[in-house]
Structures are given as C-alpha cells and as structure tokens.
Image (cartoon, helix red, strand yellow):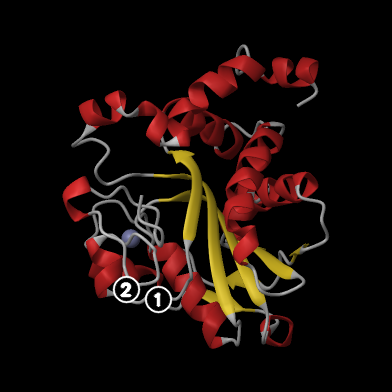
Amino acid sequence: MCSICGERVLSSYAACDADGLLRCPACRRIQHYYERAVAFGSYEGTLRELIHLLKYSGVRPAARVLGRLLAQSVATIEPEFTQESVLVIPVPLYKGKRRQRGFNQVELIARAALRFRRNGKLELAPDCLRRVRDTRSQIGLTSHQRRENLRGAFVVNRSPEVTGREVLLVDDVYTTGTTASECSRVLRRAGASRVWVATVARTLKLASKYQELQQQEVSEFQGLNVSKICRDCLPTLEPRDFETLKL
Ligand SMILES: [Zn+2]
C-alpha cells in the first residue's frame, strides 16, 4: 500500500523513498495537501453494505460499528501526530442534503470513533468546515473535472480555531481523493499546520483489475477480512439485530 494515499501499489512499482515510505507513482509526482490518508478497509462487501445501511437506510447504530473500525485506522497514524490535541473534522454535507438525510453520517461515525479513542488527544470540531454549495456526483468525471466540481464547495467556518492546529479530516469513503484534497487545501489555507485523513473505506483503483490477485493475498489488506469480522459481530444486518447486540 502507498504510505501516503493508501492506494495499492503493484510490486514492480514498490520502492521506498529516502524517508522509508512507500509511495505510489502518483504520490511521487505530486505533493498532497494532507500528510497521509488511511482507511480501515476496501469499499466492498459487508463494509460497503454497512456504510449504505447508515447513509441511505438511516440505520444509525451502524455508525457505532463503523466508528470502531475508523478508530482502528486512526490508531495507525496517531503516533505521528505532533500536537497534544488534534482537531477532528468530519467532511460536511451540504445543508439541503443534511436536512433531507436528517444527519451527517460522517459526523456520527467520527463521534463513535472518538468514544473508542479516549486518550484526550482528539477533539471533535464538527462545525469548523462548511459545505457552501451542493456538488454533482463525481462519477464519470475526469480528475480535472472533479477538482473543478469541488472548487469553492468548502469553506472554513472558524479560521482561528484551525490556525496552527493539526487536523484529522474524517470521511466515510475515500474514492478518488478529490474531496480529501480539496478539504485539506482549504484547511491548510486557513492555517492548519498539518492535515491527516482517515476514512472507514476506500476504493482501490487496482481492485477490479487485480481481483484474482487480491483473493490470493487476502491477508495483505486488513479490510478484505472485514466481512468475517462483521459476520462475527453482526449475524444479520437487520436494525433489530443492532438493538439486540447493543452495538
Ligand atoms: Zn499514493
């Protein structure tokens, strides 16, 4: 996996740079606005179902499970945090969408994750970042179009809170990285000293192409085992089961 963006790197490209970090070809070329992006697992199977359950079916207890998984991926970058306290900022929804859905699923996941990492280092700041315009779906857009689509969509509400602070940006899914990049750019411009990105899931560009390879190397990526983890703790995905299991 690329140490910076978390993308799968083919072994022929796998080489560590001078700082000991493995970078994919894209991350060798460009400098991100964020330090590193981590994800618990691949956006497929049960993990994908759980996210959909929360996001589209409004099964809120799913946030607790997803929060626990997010907390695990946060733990992998926590040793690299340099400040005593890190601001946790969930990627915001546009107000119309939030009203329609009734909640921001990312905020629910972030809140749940913080309950699993109670060392006082993480401070939730859900209102720091605001989405000021609705954006069309990123599906089918080129990388240039995706950047254009998101440009100006986010603003920092309370710059003084962010100035000089280390920020952990949280999202449910890391797809192309455009949202993470744009939010990080805006946060850095508002004075954030460093931005880290943690998501529950991410889509792997190579996933479909190398599905067979993935199946052979199942233990290589933690997320691919998530179906097993979830099957263990969630016999079915019915809302009443969440109740019974007190998840
Ligand atoms: Zn990369």
Left or right of 102? Residue 170 is left
Task: Pick the quarter of the image with the C terminus.
Answer: top right
Say which quarter of the image contains residue 207: top left
Dot 2 falls on a residue whose secondary structure is: helix
Dot 1 falls on a residue whose secondary structure is: loop
Name which residue lies at 30% across and 24% down.
215
**Residue type, numbered disc 1:** Arg
Residue that carries the numbered disc 2 in the rendered image: 148
Q: Position of residue 235 (x, y in %)?
A: 62, 12
On the question of residue 31 being in view, the answer is: yes
Name which residue lies at 82% across and 51% down.
118
Establish if 65 lies above or below 77.
above
Could you tell me if the residues under marks 2 and 1 are in contact, i.e. CB atoms within 8 Å?
yes
Q: Quadrant of ligand 1?
A: bottom left
Residue that carries the numbered disc 1 in the rendered image: 151
Name which residue lies at 67% across and 79% down.
157
Left or right of 97? Residue 243 is right
Q: Residues within 10 Å of mark 2 (few under 14, many from 20)?
A: few
**Residue type, numbered disc 2:** Glu
On the question of residue 145 being in view, the answer is: no
Task: Find the distance from the CA under tag 2 to the CA under tag 1.
Answer: 5 Å
Left or right of 153? Residue 128 is right
